[in-house]
Amino acid sequence: MELGPSWRLLLLPALLRLLRGSVLDCPPTCHCSDTEIRCNRSHGGSFFPLLALQGGNGSLDLADLFSNITTIHVENWNGLQTLRDVDMELYTGLQRLTILNCNLRSVQSRVFARNLQLRYINLSQNPLLSLSWQLFQHLQLHELRLEGVPFECGCSIRWLQLWQQRGEAGLHTQQLFCRNGDANIRLNNMYIGSCGEYYCQYYSTSHVYPPLTHAITLTLVNVTRHDNGFQLRCIAENLVGMSDVLVHLHVLFPPSILTLSKPQRRHDTCVEFSVHAHPTPRLRWLRGGVEVPPSRVLWTLVEVERDHLEGCLTLRNPTHLDNGNYTLEASNVLGSTSRTVFSHFLPPPEPVDGLPVQQKQDFLFSRIHFLSGQVSMALELAGLAALLLLILLVLINKYGRRYKLVMKGPVAVMKSEEDSSPMRHSNYALTATCALEAGSDAVAMATDVQQMQRSSIILQRELGEGAFGKVFLAECGELSPGGELVAVKTLRDPSLAARQDFQQEAELLTALQHEHIVRFHGVCTDGEPLIMVFEYMKHGDLNKFLRAHGPDSLLVVDGQPLLPPASGELSMSQMLHVASQVAAGLAFLASQHFVHRDLATRNCLVGAALLVKIGDFGMSRDLYSSDYFRVGGHALLPVRWMPPESIVYRKFTTQSDVWSFAVVLWEIFSYGRQPWFHLSNSEVMEHVTQGGVLEQPRLCPRELYHLMLACWSTEPEQRLHIQEVHKLLSSMMRATPAYLDIQG
């Protein structure tokens, strides 16, 4: 007799349970299920209760069966005196562990090394002889129960007292005691005056160390200029706890001029150069051995990043009189260097041959009078054309609104937050169009997108290269009478498909206007290349800003300070102010059903007065290549900022942005450190998908870290919404002293 499909479905679970029962058996005096082991009855066994093997069938993956266990409760096992490393290593999915009244005396040092999802531990009513904080340092414990443990007062439990005072792991809700001679005292009343401090600090070689300081001397050999900026991590540990600090290695070396190029014609003429030096060198330009001072027609633009300077000697409308050898001289306290380039701008004018000197002068004066007349006529015609254009604009404004023109070519669409259904830009008022390309397939730009005059944009220097094309620093005279610095993004690919992408991005950016989103000024489409114009944020991306304002570092030579320290690390209130601004920008994007997908400090920009905005010119993947990882031959992904559902299923929503924002919080309170810096990209993916989260930064308040954990829930619907996060950050910021402007 053959069973039908419905009978097969009914019998399959029973067969699986039978098969599992043939492989694993529940320990004696215990009750077991697929996810729990509960041993509540007295037992004299001296080993931790393990699921027992039966039948020897190795075809099943036993590690998977053990990893399904999330709860273990053991009570009254009087012979269980030691918890060993091997007892726990198979239960990789364990979340709750209770060992109650079991005569437990010792716990081996790496017993929880593989239980990364463990959140609750109860070791109450056990005569533990010792317990170290190092057992739990890699866990994200929500609760650690230790009632009824007869601790001995001393330095070995000083860490417990500190945790209880800080309210960590729920210890502040418990009545804990320790024995001081014959008396029992409350743990929070214990006073031990000589446990020692546990913090890292670094000094110059001439420093006189205070008492109880354990000093070590680190000698570095074969140090070169390429080691400048390298990070050294100092870790201090004792019975009380652990502390670490990052030290930036400062290598001092004289300048070297890496490049000095021939003049390049842009809007102005630029002589590009790059210099490598530390400390930052002084730059001078000489021509014919004489220093060339800056002026309105000749100046130097320089961008400094750590020990690398890039810049441009800019000349406005140079002539043949400016031809010659230009020498760049760079010097600091350790030396100087120079390099020369011959710059040819224009050939000299041809002489008027065959005429005496007086006749040459008469000829030149007659040419000047003729050209003056031509200029006057041109000015009159230009004035008449401007008047006619003004009249035409008035007529169009008065009568042209009656007609509604249709945008040619493919309609601009934007995807919903899960990329499942296209949503038309119905809020764009397409009352007129400006064609980007002639022909029946011309792409038109909605009139809501501001059109800017190419003549008003003066390129100054290149900032980098993004997804569309190069990005320049420029001056735009159309935004303010005196000109305003802007960032200009150009379109590299002239194809119709690229132009359509350019159009869609411009229309989307026009709709995304918010005080904490980098402002989009408009486009320039009268000629090639097509240009997008954004506001310029003077302090660059937030990651570099955080690294530059981390813990103070001091440059020393022979034990003496060489340069003043940096402008100081950010205060708690300043970091909360930065975080609140990023949250405000992200909350606006979420309200527009816009998913960022790549939120990180590298994609936020910092302006004057600590103003922070979300913005991305597409350059970060080149500058921060180690932050991206190519998964399965697909596009580069920022896996260190991605939640489990984005890593496994490539699913991005506003709630995946909330996860990324919590990582941004971690970056801010770690002064720009890379998340999971000690793991490779593939290890990060494995760790996150198994429930791992980042540890609490050393300077991060406990309340803020709890906020991060609420954003790192494995299930997206259980995470806080970004609007809630913004409100909580705003309330935390109001509870701290007002921040001080550190940048002008």
Image: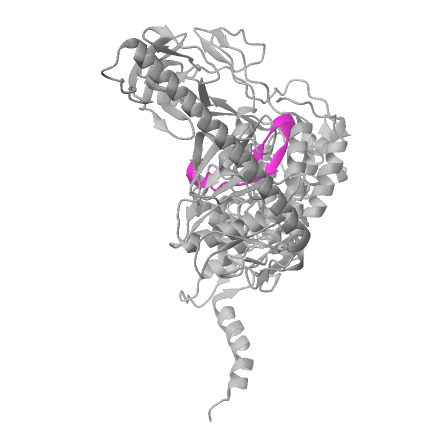
Residue drawn at point x = 51 percent, y = 60 percent = 408
Estimate the x, y position of residue 402 in percent, counting from the top left: 67, 59
Estimate the x, y position of residue 521 in percent, counting from the top left: 58, 40
Say if 231 sits above or below 333 in the image: below
Q: Nearer the viewer, residue 349 or 19?
A: 349
Q: Count how many numbered circles sit on residues in the image.
A: 0
Say if 562 sits above or below 680 in the image: above
Does the image show residue 134?
no
Q: Nearer the viewer, residue 467 or 703?
A: 467
Residue 618 painted magenta:
yes
Estimate the x, y position of residue 177 in percent, counting from the top left: 74, 33
Estimate the x, y position of residue 268 in percent, counting from the top left: 42, 26
Which quadrant of the view contains residue 702?
A: top right
Q: Quadrant of the C terminus?
A: top right
Residue furthest toward the left? Answer: 354
Say if 726 sits above or below 399 in the image: above
Q: Nearer the viewer, residue 563 or 436?
A: 436
Image position of 197 (left or right of 300) = right
Q: Nearer the viewer, residue 465 or 728?
A: 465
Image position of 235 (left or right of 192) = left
Which quadrant of the view contains residue 361?
A: top left
- Which region of the structure is painted magenta? 604-626
Does the image show residue 744?
yes
What's the colour scheme?
Answer: one colour
Residue 499 painted magenta:
no
